[in-house]
Amino acid sequence: MSTTVIILAAGKGTRMRSNLPKVLQPLAGRPLLGHVINTAKKLQADHIITIYGHGGALVQNAFAHEQVQWVEQAEQLGTGHAVKVTLPVLPREGVSLILSGDVPCITEQTLQKLLDVSRETQIGLVTLTLADATGYGRIVRENGKIQAIVEHKDASEAQRQIQEINTGIYCVSNAKLHEWLPKLSNNNAQGEYYLTDIVAMAIADGLEVASVEPQLAFEVEGVNDRVQLAALEREFQNFQAKQLMQQGVHLIDPTRFDLRGNLTAGKDVRIDINVIIEGDCELGDGVEIGAGCILKNTKIAAGTKVQPYSVFDQAVVGEAAQIGPFSRLRPGAVLANEVHIGNFVEVKNSQIGLGSKANHFTYLGDAEVGAGSNIGAGTITCNYDGANKFKTIIGDQVFIGSNSSLVAPVTIANGATVGAGSTITRDVAEQCLAVERSKQFTKENYQRPQKLKK
């Protein structure tokens, strides 16, 4: 049976106090709506229909790369109205999961359970039991079976004592949606078309309403303001940290760790406090990441040690390397095994060969460095003339003295030496020494200039 996912994402999110639509607010580095779409893709949904409204162009542009069918809800007249506007494009066969774009943490596992229990009943929903259910729609049961969902404002005093709530997540037969949605009424305290009313229609048709509860309560938490967003961020990060630790990753303090993407880690990986992982990252066996590091779309091979406060962006690092502290690897940085990149060294669009070292205050941009070379402190590759980039090639076993400027395009051949303080503008042949600096002179009894008296 085919599965459609309908995502309600038309709300403005006034309480966010933002020019950005609520469903585009970030959670763990991804828009709220992005989390829901990603979960729908994991379920291999045949159709993903997203209902947009406020900030529609921004929302659509943010997900232009996704295979999503967009339906506009020009007027926000309630959840029932939101789903109703999808009827012209909603298949008449199969089932639909109805999700909210501001409830980002619902898991594939919970939704699969909902699908499984709803196949026969034609309707099911996710419920949650809370100690304090104030403000939520209540699940009214009789002899254990769901009879109705009553919104808080419409509930009697007795119904408000019910602790089981509706999370707004449904699984419904498409045929029944086509039958029930046109019959919805807005005769209620809010003057809105409630999607919850389809439960009463199901009961009237003699159907049993299935239900499941999520394994973790935060899966069904929604976001309405910055306070809720921050609280959910930490709950989600704690959940991800726990998963990594169960896989064997040693997090020094899981409450001070942020994963804003995906991390694949080998055995005995150690991550210190305040590390941020973004995008898709991979850490090999025995990798150690020091405090305060940021890794984005980076791959680090086994045995490499990263000292604190280093920043990686689209970098590839080989085995047994030593990086940092305060190093920066920018896009296109590819380091071979046993490379040393030290404090305040920046590498961009460069390949560094086996065992080569740049330990202090150096910039290597658009460069190729061979094996076993040493780049002295203060060295820079002058790769940009103000309009175009040029390459510096440094061979094997090269020694570059401190405070050298290598003006690209230039090649320093195997075994060559560059004297400290040199500005190299021409190629240096193998096993040669190149020195370019002014001759030092000393003037005895030198008198410094004095300030003029007024």
Image (cartoon, helix red, strand yellow):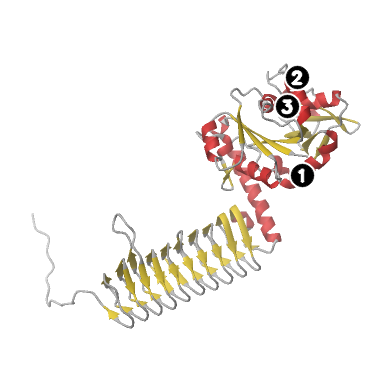
Q: Earlier in the sequence, mark 1 or mark 2?
A: 1
Residue drawn at point x = 53 percent, y = 70 percent = 318
Residue receiving disc 3 = 195
Of residue 183 and residue 338, the one placed in the foreground of this image is 183
Circles 1 and 3: CB atoms closer than 8 Å: no
User: Closer to us: mark 3 or mark 2?
Assistant: 2
As measured in the structure, the alpha-carbon distance from the residue carrying label 1 to the one carrying label 2 is 29 Å
Q: Amino acid at mark 3?
A: Leu
Coordinates of residue 240 in the picture (x, y in percent):
66, 53
In this view of the protein, can residue 158 be seen by the observer? no
Of residue 87 and residue 378, the one placed in the foreground of this image is 87
Label 1 crowding class (10 Å Cα cut-off): few <14, some 14-19, many 20+? few
Label 3 crowding class (10 Å Cα cut-off): few <14, some 14-19, many 20+? many
| Label disc, if present, on residue 26 of the rendered structure | none
Q: Quadrant of residue 22?
A: top right
Of residue 310 and residue 379, the one placed in the foreground of this image is 379
For the view shown, which residue lies furthest in the top direction?
A: 187
Relative to residue 14, is residue 335 depicted above or below? below
Q: Earlier in the sequence, mark 1 or mark 3?
A: 1
Residue receiving disc 2 = 183
Left or right, 453 with reference to 272: left
Circles 1 and 2: CB atoms closer than 8 Å: no
Q: Amino acid at mark 2?
A: Lys
Relative to residue 395, is residue 82 depicted above or below? above
Residue at disc 2, secondary structure: helix
Label 2 crowding class (10 Å Cα cut-off): few <14, some 14-19, many 20+? few
Q: Earlier in the sequence, mark 3 or mark 2?
A: 2
Residue at disc 1, secondary structure: helix
Q: Amino acid at mark 1?
A: Gln
In this view of the protein, can residue 450 be seen by the observer? yes
Residue receiving disc 1 = 112
